[in-house]
Structure formats: structure tokens, C-alpha cells
Amino acid sequence: MYEQIYESASLNLYFNNDTAIIKMEWTDASEGLDAEGFKTEMLNYINHATDKNAKAVLTDARHYAFPITPDVQEYIVENILTRYDEIGMKKQAFVVSSDFIAQLSIEQTISDGEASNLKFKTAYFETEKQATDWILYDKIANKANANSNGN
């Protein structure tokens, strides 16, 4: 079960202690962010993820509307995505936005991070359930394998 750990006009953060998933939920107000406001929200996110020792992030970007410029993309790769390895973040799932331009900027930022040899996996989904199932798949598969091996 998710517990809310942060709230602003443009971003809500939730954490599930059972799964170690941090959930980012962007609001329509994200459209009004400037570059500095977006960076501040991303720092709030990564600081909470670090404090909670999150192992995966589920980003609900269906209401996300801030197009990430190349300068901000670089900032995110250098200051947010690089911290994923430090905290043991393994997966990042996106529930995608209907705003095509904003969606492209999200995908480009993640591609830049992957090009930097970061070690987390990223995937995009249409529903939160699909995203959560993908994040938890390894845990479920490992548990099933352990049970089938008599453990």
C-alpha cells in the first residue's frame, strides 16, 4: 500500500514499504513549471527515494506536461539518474502521457541516461497495473523459483 510522502502543486510522491517502490505522480500543474522548478521537484524526488531506499520508481506521467529541454535533460542525467546506482535503484516504469512532446522529452532524457551506462531498466506502459507488474516481475519470478526448488 502506498503512503504519501510529498505533495506539491505539480508532483505527489508515494512510497510502498512492502515493495520498495516510490511512485511519482505528476499533475496538470507541471505544465506551469520552469526549468528551476522542475529541477527542484526532481531533487525532492531523488532525496525521498534515497531516504526510503527505493529500489524501483513508478512514474505516472499521464498528466505530465513539462517539456524537458536538452539542458535540463543533461541536469537530470548528471544529478538524478546517476544516483540510481548509488541507492540500488533497479527499475523505472512510466505510465505514459498523452502529451506527445512531453513524452518524447521523458524518453530522450532516459535514453541519455542509458547511454551513460547507468544500470537500471526502463519501460513504458499504458496502465499503472502493467507498470507495477513489470517492476515486481523479478521478485515474483525469484519467489516462484525458490518455492519450486524446495526453499
Image (cartoon, rainbow, N blue to C red):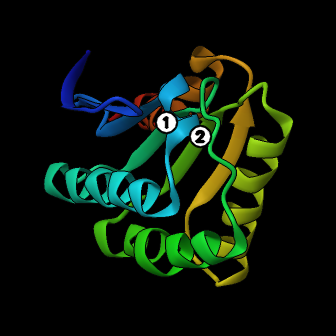
Q: Nearer the viewer, residue 90 or 82?
A: 82
The quarter of the picture where residue 72 lies is: bottom right
Q: State the quadrant of the C terminus.
A: top left
* Label 1: which secondary element: strand
The residue positioned 29% from the left and 67% from the top of the image is 87
| Residue 141 visible within the image | no
The amino acid sitting under disc 1 is Leu
Determine whether, in the image, residue 11 is placed left or right of residue 91.
left
| Residue 139 percent coordinates (x, y) | 45, 37
Classify 14 as above or below 52.
Answer: above
Depth check, front residue: 98 or 113? 98
For the residues labelled 1 and 2, say whether their Cβ atoms are less than 8 Å apart: yes
Depth check: give the residue in front, 136 or 106. Answer: 106
Q: CA distance from mark 1 to mark 2?
A: 5 Å
141 relative position to 126: left or right = left
Location of mark 2 (residue): 93
